[in-house]
Image (cartoon, rainbow, N blue to C red):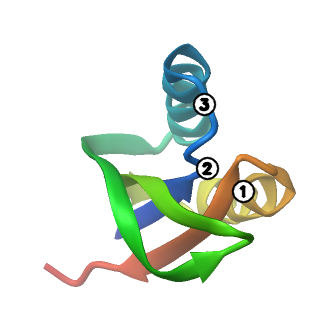
């Protein structure tokens, strides 16, 4: 199991209830595969450094996970499919 820090940006047009459900759904990808979500940090609505798909703002979420490769690969696959996620980044955390 490795530690990862994952940041993703949700479209600003997503309603609050749908956004909360999406965050829970993405966390469940890890927990259902034996990984542990150690921290969920919602940064909220922020300005983007540059326009992405005609959006100037996005809802930032950063999570820390202790995960196996299977869960990380499945998260990567699901996030690529989701149209509500406009950008994401997975970093291996060595600390």
**Picture quadrant of residue 40:** top left
Residues 2 and 37: in front is: 37
**Picture quadrant of residue 19:** top right
Q: Residue 79 has which mark?
A: 1
Q: In what element is the residue under mark 2?
A: loop
Which residue is tagged 2?
11
Residue in the image at 55% along x and 46% along y: 12
Say if mark 3 contacts mark 1, CB within 8 Å. Answer: no
- Give the residue at the far top of this rendering: 17
Q: How packed is label 3: few (under 14 Cα within 10 Å), some, or many (20 or more)? A: some
Q: Position of residue 15 (x, y in %)?
A: 58, 24
Residue in the image at 70% along x and 64% along y: 76
Residues 70 and 14: in front is: 14
Q: Do we see residue 70 in this rendering?
A: yes
Q: Is residue 22 left or right of residue 45?
A: right
Q: Do we see residue 1 in this rendering?
A: no
Which residue is tagged 3?
22
Q: Is residue 53 left or right of residue 33?
A: right
Work out whether mark 3 precedes mark 1 in sequence or the reverse, and give the earlier one.
3
Q: Position of residue 87 (x, y in %)?
A: 60, 69
Residue in the image at 46% along x and 44% along y: 35
Q: In what element is the residue under mark 1?
A: helix
Q: Quick one: quadrant of the N terminus?
A: bottom left
The alpha-carbon separation of the residues under discs 2 and 3 comes to: 11 Å
**Picture quadrant of residue 79:** bottom right
Say if mark 2 contacts mark 1, CB within 8 Å. Answer: no
Work out whether mark 2 precedes mark 3 in sequence or the reverse, and give the earlier one.
2
Considering only vertical position in the picture, is 45 above or below 6? above
The alpha-carbon separation of the residues under discs 3 and 1 comes to: 10 Å
Work out whether mark 2 precedes mark 1 in sequence or the reverse, and give the earlier one.
2
């Amino acid at each position: 199991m490795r530690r990862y820090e994952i940041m993703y940006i949700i479209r600003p047009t997503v309603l609050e209830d749908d956004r909360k459900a999406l965050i829970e759904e993405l966390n469940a990808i890890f927990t259902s595969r034996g990984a542990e979500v150690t921290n969920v940090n919602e940064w909220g609505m922020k300005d983007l450094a540059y326009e992405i798909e005609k959006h100037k703002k996005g809802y930032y979420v950063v999570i820390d996970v202790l995960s196996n490769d299977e869960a990380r690969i499945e998260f990567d696959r699901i996030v690529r499919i989701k149209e509500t996620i406009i950008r994401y980044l997975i970093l291996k955390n060595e600390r």
